Amino acid sequence: MKKLAVGIITYNRPNELKRALDSCFENGIKNPEDIIVWDNHSKKTLSLKNEEICNDLGVRYYFSSSNLGVAGGRNKIWDLDDSDYVFFLDDDAIISSKDFFKNIVEYMESNPIVGAASVNIDEPETGVDHNSKERKQDGDKIVTLAYIGGAHILRRHAYPMKRLYPNNLIFGSEELYASLVYWQEGYEVREISKLNVTHLPKKQIVSYGKERDLCIIVNSYIVKKMLYPKYMRIILKCLYCIRLYKNKIDVLDANRTLKSRKNERTLYKIRLKTIMYLMKLFGVRSLI
């Protein structure tokens, strides 16, 4: 069985995709078939460029007949490979540490308690800090509540469910869902700060505003409703409303988004003991 697969979702960004793929080959990927590119329904001319790039490099390429969002796209990649580890990289990011993939696999092999880990993500164009705010550092070890979506590795066979994320999450806080599952299964989620990825979004399309905040708040609420004990739902609803107010997000917009995304169910639940443990590590506010 293969040790590692690399998954990249792309959408209308062939130049950025080529740059990301080149950085993978420059930093440790030797077999092109270890890389899976999921094209999330790019425009026809751009999807043809994406396919040409992948064919030239020998990378596995799949075109989606519709845009499945981040959650759905990563679910497809998760299903397409059975490697021990899957590393997900944003298409507008590049690997910027030498021997990156050798080192990240060695880290996971030598730390069997780690279920998922993100790496240090720099964004020189904007200076935005993409690393986790909910963290606890103990020497060189950084434990986080949830991994960061832009660049992270997942231990496949530690994950108890076939599907990685609920498809209806689309974008925003889907990482919280999988991270809570790993914690419940007895694994840690960490940041490997010595390994670096550089995020290079186009200046004109960088957006960290209300739409992103809305997705994160709504999806965090959905994830907690799915996974937490039912008796916590009143508290979760109250705090959800408070967060909408504090972030000046229109309640009608939020409720429309919530209605469009809340139709999935899961039998998997996080025990109160696990929630209390995580509260001790990261604070009550982070968990509810």
Image (cartoon, rainbow, N blue to C red):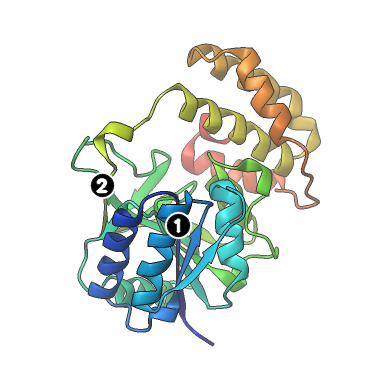
> Under tag 2, what secondary structure?
loop
**Image spot of residue 130 (x, y percent):** 34, 42
Quadrant into which the C terminus falls? top right
Q: Which mark is residue 200?
A: 2
Whether residue 119 is situated above or below residue 174 in the rendered picture: below
Q: On the image, which quarter does residue 123 sit in?
A: top left
Residue at image location 49% in from the left, 46% down from the top: 145
Q: Which residue is mark 1?
A: 47
Q: Is residue 150 left or right of residue 155?
A: left
Distance of label 1 from label 2 (alpha carbons): 21 Å
Q: Is residue 233 left or right of residue 74?
A: right
> Under tag 1, what secondary structure?
helix
Quadrant into which the N terminus falls? bottom right
Which of the marked residues, 1 or 2, is nearer the chain's N terminus? 1
Q: Please, what is the three-letter code of the amino acid marked with disc 2?
A: Leu
Instruction: Report whether residue 37 is seen.
Output: yes
**Image spot of residue 79 (x, y percent):** 63, 68
Residue at image location 37% in from the left, 84% down from the top: 31
Please state which of residues 91 and 66 is positioned toward the viewer in this rendering: 66
**Image spot of residue 151 (x, y percent):** 38, 56
